[in-house]
Image (cartoon, rainbow, N blue to C red):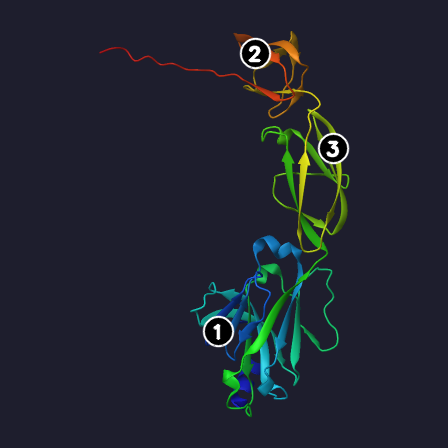
């Protein structure tokens, strides 16, 4: 077994082959302890939608009673594991980033920080690893014997390995707008803490704490909301928009001229134009072609005006 130790310590920090008896996977969704035997591979993954929330990870390893006080077991962490993990796979490629002979204690704590995070690793009895970027995932952790003298029953003893997320002071805001059609939302302007943002419906990453939201649009008075984002969590915020007046939305060619109630107007694509209730007339001109319509506005909704140009080809009879 001393030969094994010499081999492990002589392997350079680079890509190498990882062999294990079997594979177990932690994917961020199970917070319970994972029984890990010697020479098994624990693959650690992070859901892509949560990567920005993490400041790092913590591995808590509870040593089985029969191996407490026994020297000669090392914990090794690899990054950039390939190929994709599966329970049946036994061989991987990865880059070794951490090697530590475990102390003779009942529990060992290994902390894996992310770069440029607000988490400061360390503390009594804690082993920090070099920083691991989210793009380095999946990781693989292996417990392996590195010297002789282990009890003959060591291979049948299960370590309990618990992987804990260490969250950064960040969280997601999931914003949902009610009272507006999908075509109306692009015409609105969104501000968080006074800074304009692009609203796509996707979660918005923010620092934890209190924030202010302002929404401006042509069919309603500016809305202001205060909300709190929790560390490592997603906050749902539903904003109900109450219209102050109806509006118009034009779908016409860019070369078209638009006259509303006798006055020429400019209507950019997706731009909502406020309008009063009552009877109105619209004239749309494209070159020498023009069309006139009257319409009635009775509710606080968006009225869409679309110019449809049809083309008819008649085939001669044979």
Q: Do the CB atoms of the residues marked 3 and 2 lie less than 8 Å apart?
A: no
Q: Specify the quadrant of the image occupied by residue 257.
A: top right
Check disc 2 and report its element: helix, strand or loop: strand
Residue under pointer 3:
223
Between disc 1 and disc 2, whose residue precedes? 1
| Most foreground residue, 22 or 265 | 22
Q: Check disc 2 and report the residue beneath it.
A: 284
Distance CA(mark 1)–CA(mark 3): 58 Å
Gap between marks 3 and 2 measured at Cα = 34 Å
Residue 148 x/y as whole percent? 54, 91
Q: Upstream in the sequence, badge 3 or badge 2?
A: 3
Identify which residue, 30 or 75, lies in the foreground.
30
Tell me how far mark 1 sits from mark 2, CA to CA: 70 Å
The answer to whether residue 220 is seen in the rendering is yes
Q: Is residue 130 left or right of residue 12?
A: right
Residue 12 position, x and y percent, is: 57, 76
């Amino acid at each position: 077994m001393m030969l094994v130790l010499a081999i492990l310590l002589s392997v350079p920090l680079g890509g190498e082959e990882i062999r294990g008896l079997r594979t177990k996977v932690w994917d961020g969704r199970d917070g319970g302890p994972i029984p890990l035997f010697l020479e098994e591979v624990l693959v650690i993954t992070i859901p892509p939608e949560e990567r920005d929330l993490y400041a790092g990870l913590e591995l808590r390893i509870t040593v089985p009673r029969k191996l407490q006080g026994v020297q000669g077991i090392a914990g090794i962490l690899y990054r950039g594991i390939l190929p994709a993990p599966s329970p049946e796979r036994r061989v991987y490629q990865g880059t070794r980033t951490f090697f530590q002979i475990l102390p003779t204690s009942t529990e060992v704590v290994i902390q894996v920080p992310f770069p440029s995070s607000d988490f400061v690793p360390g503390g009594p009895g804690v082993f920090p690893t070099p920083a691991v970027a989210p793009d380095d995932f999946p990781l693989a952790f292996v417990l392996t014997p590195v010297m002789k003298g282990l009890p003959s029953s060591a291979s049948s003893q299960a370590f309990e390995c618990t992987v804990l997320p260490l969250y950064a002071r960040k969280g997601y805001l999931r914003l949902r707008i009610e009272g507006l059609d999908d075509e109306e939302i692009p015409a609105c302007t969104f501000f968080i803490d006074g800074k304009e943002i692009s609203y796509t419906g996707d979660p918005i990453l923010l620092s934890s704490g209190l924030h202010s939201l302002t929404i401006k649009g042509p069919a309603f008075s500016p809305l202001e909301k205060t909300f709190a984002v929790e560390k490592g969590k997603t906050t749902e915020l539903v904003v109900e928009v109450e219209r102050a007046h109806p509006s118009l939305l034009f779908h016409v060619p860019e070369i078209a001229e638009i006259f509303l109630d006798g006055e020429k107007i400019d209507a950019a694509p997706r731009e909502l134009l406020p309008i009063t209730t009552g009877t109105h007339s619209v004239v749309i001109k494209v070159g020498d072609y023009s069309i006139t319509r009257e319409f009635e506005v009775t509710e606080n909704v968006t009225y869409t005006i679309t110019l449809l140009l049809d083309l008819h080809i008649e085939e001669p009879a044979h």
